[in-house]
Image: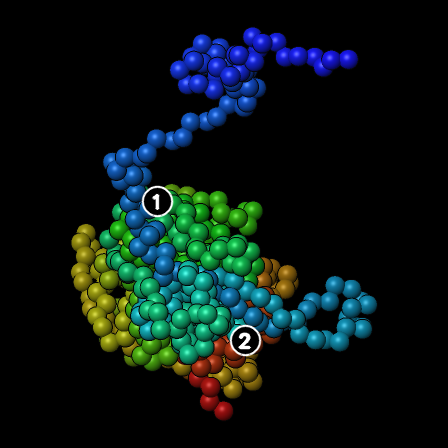
Amino acid sequence: MRPRSVPSFALAAVLACLAPAACSGQEARDSTERAEVATVAEADRPPVLPRRQAVGQDLDQSRTTAIVRAARRTAPAVVSVNTIRSRQPRSSSLWDRLFSDGGQQRVPGLGSGFIIHADGLILTNEHVVRAAESIVVTLGDGRNFGAEVVGVDVVNDLALLRIDEAAPLNPDADASEPFAVAPLGDSDDLLIGEWVVAIGNPFGFQLANTEPTVTAGVVSGVGRNIASQQDDAGFYLDMIQTDASINPGNSGGPLVNALGEVIGVNSSILSSSGGSEGLGFAIPINRARRIALDLLDDGVVRRPWVGLDVEPVSDGSFARSRRVRVSAVTPGSPAEDAGLEPGAVILSAGGRALRTPLDWQAALLDASVGGELALEVARGDGSRTLSLTPVDLPSVTAQRIQALADFELVSLNPAIRAERGLVSEQGALIVDLSEAARTQLGLRRGDLILQVNQTRVRGAEQAADLLAAAAGRGSTRLAYERDGRLAYTWFYVTDER
């Protein structure tokens, strides 16, 4: 059987297409077929989003707002402060109490801070490093260093740390690379409503990168006196209020203005949930700067004392305090030397208007030992100005406090509270005290100790322990109730044996 032959017209068409000039008609037909196939295939593909057009220089500049520039200027100087401390675990059951070995738990802590000097000085909160056995700071570029505590101020909740440049903790860290330094601004001329940025490390090592978190808001208020909602925390005086989000882990980080200058140290929040609710507070940087210099020079903060107590004066409307007056003057004190007497109404101190006793305490925070403190005192329909020269706080002895020779205390209970008509539900009642404590500190029998530094007092034993623990740690602030009102006294606890 003969094989089938290819039709001659088909072979001619194939050969003709090998010649460029001879296949134009065939190419046209093939092109049409390919276009039809391509159209069908294109219809089956998912839509392709167009590429964003190149952004013009003007648009880039409009995105680089003051907040962006402020964050870029300060964020490189912000560090994460990581601590390890030991604590005794609380037994939750009888079994645990009977059979627990009583061992210590090593508990990690987290906070933020910022570098204020090229040699590695860091400002942070005292509560961030309290009782820390070891401290590691992580820079924004990923370098880890050990750090030591230069000094602390418990009253203002501030601590000064120094980076140990000789001991970088990651092998590839270059210790010779200079530290970024945060520029410090002026907290005395803040504007209500001006933009601010809170920078910190709210999650620490839970995030993969080491760059700090940035949140924006405004200055909501200045000169705020607040009481912390934490059970063991006390009062914060003369704070900057902001609605910039401040979360756990942000403590000790900077609050920055639109120029990229630090105007405060983020310290606390008021919250019913534990998270940020737009009520954040920062310590003014002018006070923090002065405290850092004291800690660097002397290791402690010199606290001024003038020897007077104040009480609120109500104007009758809703029983709100509008002014303060002198309730007691210590003999031989700067207040007595200036001619102040009980009953005098103080309108302002150091240029700060006084409406409550907390305003007076805030004014003392910004006063300096040996400097002048101007008081505006009411006189008739006008006023007069007096000048005081604050001196160092008086001191008491830790050994005597431990032996309760300066203070004989009892824990408050419902019977004592009802008998004495006390407002507070917890505290340590002073039932006896030494002559030195009475004359120098202005305390009396019947005063109820509510707080030692930033820790609230629940009973007499705790108060004695807190006073003993304050030995050698700088000035101590004692808050107490007298005649239904809150009052303060300050002193040094010396470690004399």
Residue found at the very far bottom of the displayed protein: 497
Kindly identify the residue that appears in the image at 45 percent across and 74 percent down: 168
Kindly identify the residue that appears in the image at 61 percent across and 67 percent down: 107
Return the residue nearer the eye: 56 or 297: 56
| Numbered badge on residue 482 | none
Which coloring applies here? rainbow
Return the residue nearer the eye: 386 or 72: 72
Q: Tag 1: Cα neighbours inside 10 Å, few (<14), some, or many (≥20)?
A: some
Left or right placement of residue 180 versus residue 137 in this view:
left
Q: Tag 2: Cα neighbours inside 10 Å, few (<14), some, or many (≥20)?
A: few
Of pointers 1 and 2, the one earlier in the residue sequence: 2
* Amino acid type for the residue under numbered disc 1: Val
Q: Secondary structure at mark 1?
A: strand
Q: Which residue is mark 1?
A: 218
| Numbered badge on residue 133 | 2
Q: Secondary structure at mark 2?
A: loop
Q: Quadrant of the N terminus?
A: top right
Left or right placement of residue 416 versus residue 326 in this view:
right
Kindly identify the residue that appears in the image at 52 percent across and 12 percent down: 13
Residue 284 image position (x, y, % from top left) = 33, 59
User: Residue 119, located in which quarter of the rendered image?
Assistant: bottom left
Kindly identify the residue that appears in the image at 61 percent across and 9 percent down: 7
Return the residue nearer the eye: 4 or 415: 4
Return the residue nearer the eye: 333 or 224: 224
Say whether residue 416 is visible: yes
Residue 95 image position (x, y, % from top left) = 82, 68
- Mark in front: 1 vs 2: 2
Say whether residue 430 is visible: no
* Amino acid type for the residue under numbered disc 2: Glu
Cα–Cα gap, marks 1 and 2: 37 Å
Residue 418 image position (x, y, % from top left) = 60, 59
Q: Is residue 24 above or below residue 424?
A: above
